[in-house]
Image: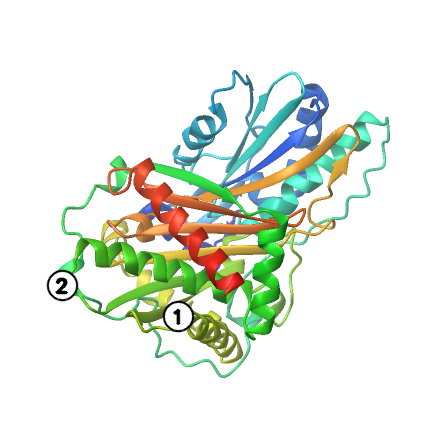
Amino acid sequence: MGKALCTAEHMGLKFDRAIACNLQITIHCKGIVNIEFFQKALNIIQKRHFYLNVFVDSTKAEFNQFEASPFIPLTVIDDKGLNQWPEEAEEDLNKRFSAENAPYARVKILRSSNECKIIMTLCHFVSDGISGLNLLRSILEVYNKLLNNETDFGLKEIPEMALDFELFPEGIDEDFSIFPPEIEQDIIQKNRIPLEQRKVGFFEHTLSVEETCSLTSKCRNENTTVYGALCAFAMAAMADEISERYVSIEEVAVDCISAINMRQLLNKPISDEQLGFGALMAKTHQSVFSKQKSLWEVAKNAKRDLESFILKHGLFKQLYFISEAFGLTDEEFSQEMEYSGQYIIISNLGIIEDKNMPRQLGNIEFEKISLSGTTHYVQGTEWGIFITANTFDGRLNLGFNYTKGYWDSNRVERYANKVVKIINEMSNG
C-alpha cells in the first residue's frame, strides 16, 4: 500500500511535469574529497529521507517504496580547468528527472589536485534550496565522521511531512489567483521556445565583503532588507533593459516574484532539513519604473508587501489554486504556467550560518556556495530571469539563471553588471 500524495505534493508533481523544475547547489571547496567515504556518507543520508527512497505511481497518485532503493548517482570528473565547472553544472541542471523513476537527486564531484566542487542536483518536486543545503551539509558531516572512524553519526529520525490544509492557519479566503495581473502587451514575447527544447544557463557574480557590508548597512538605514533591495534593483535593471529596446515607452511595469520559506509559519513547524516542495511559496511584486522612481521606496514597498502577505496568510491561499489545477491536463496546466510577461524571480537563502553549512570539515575548507535552478514559467520569456542569492563567509553571491535562446551569455552578463552597478551606487549614495 503506497502513501497518497497530499495537496502540496500534487502541486509539486504538476509543476515538475509542466515546467521541469530542478534546483542545484554547488559547494566550492579547498582540499581533496575521499570518494569512497563520500559515497558511503551519501548512501547513509539517503536512507533517512522518505523522498529519496520512493517513486511516484501516477496512476494511483501515491508514493511507493522501493524494495531495494537505487543509490543516488555519484559521478566523479577530473577538473581540467578552463572554467569547466559551469558546463558540468549546466549539464546536470538541464537533465529532467522522471517522477516515475527515482531517486530524485544526483551528485557530481569535479576535482583537481587541491580543490573540488561538489554539485548536487535535486528535483524541485522533493526539495527546496533550504532543505537541499541541509541535505548536503548532513552528507558532509557524516563523511567527516567516517574519515575519523566514528560510528555514531548522531542522526535522528526525520518525520514525514504532509503539507495539507490541517497544517494551515484558519480564516483563509479562497478568492486568490497565483497569476500576476495583465502587463504591457506590446512587449510580450510571442515566439516561444518549446519547453522540451529549453536549456538553462547561469552567470555568477560575488560581491566583496566590503560591498556586502555596505549594502546591508544601507538597507538598515533605509528601513528595508537586502531581499527588498534585491527586488527593487533587479526590477530597475530589467526596466532599463526593456527601455533600451522600446525607447518610446516612458514607464515600464516589471514583476518580481519572491520565493518564501513557510516552514516556521505552519501550525506544526517543520525543520530546515525536512525535504519537500510545499515548504516554499511565492509572492508577486509589481512596480512601474520611470526616471523619477525612487529605488529605496520600491525596496521598502517590497519589504512591506512581503510582510503583509505573510501576515494575511497569502502563502496558504495559493494552495487553493490546486483544487482548480487538479482538473487540468498536464498540457493545460503547462499553458497556464506559460503566462506571458517579463518576470524576475528572486530566491534568497540569506546568511548561511554554521548550522546550515560550516566553514570547514576535516581537511575540506568551504569557500563559496552557488545556487541555480530551472523555473521555466519565469525563464520561458524574452525577459524572464531567475536570480538566486546567498551570503556565505561575508560575501553576497548572486546567480543569474536564464533560458538560452532568449538570452545569451553576453546579454546576461550585461544585465548582471547593471544589477551590481545599481547595488553599489545605491549602497554608497
Task: Give the structural element (helix, strand or loop) at label 1.
Answer: helix
Reply above or below: 127 against 197: below
Residue at 37% across, 41% down: 413
Find the residue positioned furthest to the front.
429
Q: Is residue 369 left or right of residue 277?
A: right
Q: Residue at x 54, y 72 (%)?
A: 224
Residue 248 shows which numbered tag?
2
Amino acid type, callout 1: Tyr
**Earlier along the polypeptide chain: callout 1 or callout 2?**
2
Name the secondary structure under disc 2: loop
To which residue does mark 1 refer?
320
Tell me which corner region of the image, top left, top right, bottom left or bottom right, holds residue 317.
Answer: bottom left
Which of the two marks, 1 or 2, is nearer to us in this view?
Answer: 2
Residue 20 figure quarter: top left
Identify the image's colour scheme: rainbow, by chain, secondary structure or one colour: rainbow
The answer to whether residue 29 is visible is yes
- Residue 20 in view: no
Q: Tag 2: residue type?
A: Ser
| Label 2: how many Cα within 10 Å (few below 14, some 14–19, many 20+) | few
Q: Depth check: 153 or 205 in front? A: 205
Q: Nearer the viewer, residue 188 or 220?
A: 220
Q: Position of residue 241 (x, y in %)?
A: 27, 54
Number of disc labels: 2
Q: Is residue 171 left or right of residue 416?
A: right
Spatial CA distance of label 1 from label 2 is 40 Å
Q: Position of residue 184 (x, y in %)?
A: 18, 66
